[in-house]
Amino acid sequence: MTDIQASIGLKQMEKLDFILKRRKELALRYNAVFGKSEFFKIPYVPSNCSYNYQSYILKLTNKVKKSRDRIMQELSNFAPQNFTNTKTVKRHFAW
């Protein structure tokens, strides 16, 4: 790690509580909207756990008749940064 990377990391740590709070606020808004739909399954977070919402995982149910790509295109009107998947830790390559 370089000195610059360390410096940026330290500054980000100062803002960590705010960042996590804001992510949770956004996730709760998404849950409120998507949770009402029979077409989406929102993230489940057990009461004894916390989630940092680095990514908001939204699953499509079997009731969806459109393709995943079509849904992503339509969601891009509301959430421009959507991706087809997130990788689990075991799928990331580490040097």
Image: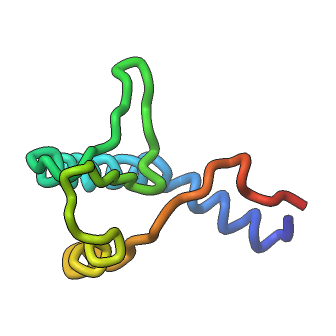
- Image location of residue 79, percent across then percent down: 27, 73
For the point 49% across and 51% down, the residue is 16
Residue 12 sits above or below residue 42 on the image: below
Picture residue at 38% right of the left edge, 72% below the top: 82
Residue under the image location 71 percent in, 54 percent down: 91
The residue positioned farthest toward the top in the image shown: 48
The answer to whether 32 appears left or right of 72 in the picture is left
User: x, y (%) of residue 43?
Assistant: 34, 42
Left-right relation of 25 to 43? left
**Of 27 and 38, which appears nearest the observer?**
38
Q: Position of residue 68 (x, y in %)?
A: 34, 69
Q: Is residue 94 above or below residue 69?
A: above
**Which quadrant of the rendered structure holds the N terminus?**
bottom right
In screen coordinates, is 8 left or right of 18? right
The residue drawn where x is 9% and y is 46% is: 36
In percent of width and height, residue 41 lies at 26, 45
Quadrant position of the C terminus in the picture? bottom right
